[in-house]
Amino acid sequence: MTKIQEVDIWTPIQIGDCHLAHRAVLAPLTRNRGTRSVEDEHTWVPNELMKTYYTERATPGGLLITEATPVSIRASGLYGIPGNFTEEQQKGWKTIVSAVHTKGGYIFNQLWHQGRTTHSALIGDKTPESSSNVPIDGTFQWNGFSARPYEVPVAMTKKAILDTQDDFVQAAKNAMAVGFDGIEIHGGNGYLFDQFLHSNINTRTDDYGGSIENRCRFIIETVEKLCNAIGPSKVAIRLTPFGLFGQTYGSDRLQQWSYLCGQLGKFGLAYVHLIEPRFDELKSAYEKQSALKDMVEQGVEEVSLRPFRKALGESTPIVTAGGFGPQNMNDGIKNGVSDLVAFGRYFVANPDLIDRLKSKKPLYKWDRSRFYGPFDDNEFGYTVFGERELASEGDILKAQLAD
């Protein structure tokens, strides 16, 4: 076996059924560049522009993870995001998967349910679902969708839970049918599964709420059903143990996610994808550091991913994401916490990121204003770039903390 100190981001690794030539991964990035379906105004379809985007970032033996894709209309909630639950969508994804494979790359499809973080106007006038009828405080707004108060979600019945699990299984089968190498469940960032995990949102008193074990039940059952449907080597999951996005302020973080990771480690998954504590969606470095300090004061013994590495065991590969760049990309691998590293913002601005990292070429700076579409000129900041500036050392340091 290769010694830990001899392994770096360029060391090959086996992930599920994929033999990767390197350990630098395209993180799942919401970009909102899909085309509205001609069959249903609430669904969006992968297109040629998206094919160009993914193909440009594919490398021989490299792993790409798609943007989050809804498993049903009710799971949706943002303009421009293609799902994987209609034939029209599957045809679009098939062309993307084929193009990535032609370049020798691998690609996993991230499966998603937004839960309470959407609005009824975007999901066929159905009330958003969640673990409980606890709404998000504030307003929902997106490009092309005016600000409106978040709605009170409906607490999912047992039937709704089973139906949603069936939706994930069907979406996974759809992904296999079009050639994806695996699927990644989005289990973090305040979306549906996270809404069951966090005690400030999940106020249920049945088998899916109350204790740590019960709050984990929905996600563990779903993982088991997916493994039975397509095989554990094709199933992965993303978690955010220290995340705050979507007002996820639950208690018992170490105990909650240590228990969950201990259960996940029994399945033989392709990998588990964890977000670094320092990083959070839409939070500044100061805000996140303050929140982490509060967690410590409230009794969190260790603010790191190491306890979850231990809980998962050495046989489950771990992908870590959140603030990695050329200066620190090997840190997690060298210290044994992670096996692979996912890059987001640097991949946005540098389609040839793998070559640039390997040859130590300078990296271009990202333009946050072009992250999330849809736009009238969707290609700009996505596959077409105008005059750009190189990322400074200050930009790189900032990225390693949070954005």
Image (spheres, grey):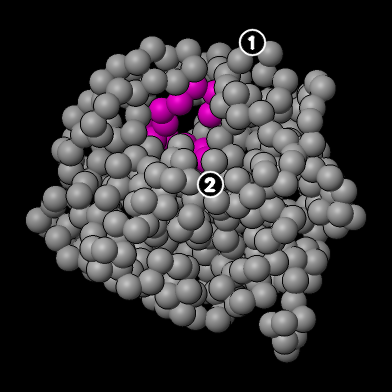
Tell me where residue 13 appears, x and y as whole percent. Answer: 73, 71
Q: Is residue 67 left or right of residue 352?
A: left
Could you say which disc has been placed on residue 76 in the image? none
**Can see residue 323?**
yes
Q: Is residue 273 left or right of residue 301?
A: right
Q: How many numbered marks appear?
A: 2
Question: Residue placed at 60% from the left, 24% from the top?
Answer: 369
* Mark nearer the N terminus (1 vs 2): 1
Q: Which residues are magenta?
A: 66-81
Q: Marks 1 and 2, Cα distance to the nearest angstrom?
A: 29 Å
Quarter-of-image position of residue 341: bottom right
Q: Quadrant of the N terminus?
A: bottom right
Quarter-of-image position of residue 333: bottom right
Disc 2 crowd, CA 10 A, few/some/many (<14, 14-19, 20+): many
Outermost residue to the front: 394
Question: Residue placed at 86% from the left, 54% from the top?
Answer: 360
Q: Is residue 321 left or right of residue 134?
A: right
Residue corresponding to mark 1:
376
Secondary element at image label 2:
loop
Quarter-of-image position of residue 53: top right
Please tell me whether residue 16 belongs to the stretch shown in magenta.
Answer: no
Residue corresponding to mark 2:
402
Q: Is residue 299 above or below residue 114?
A: below
Please state which amino acid type lies under the numbered disc 2: Ala
Predominant secondary structure, magenta span: loop
Q: Quadrant of the C terminus?
A: top right
Please state which amino acid type lies under the numbered disc 1: Asp
Secondary element at image label 1:
loop
Q: Is residue 307 above or below residue 293?
A: below
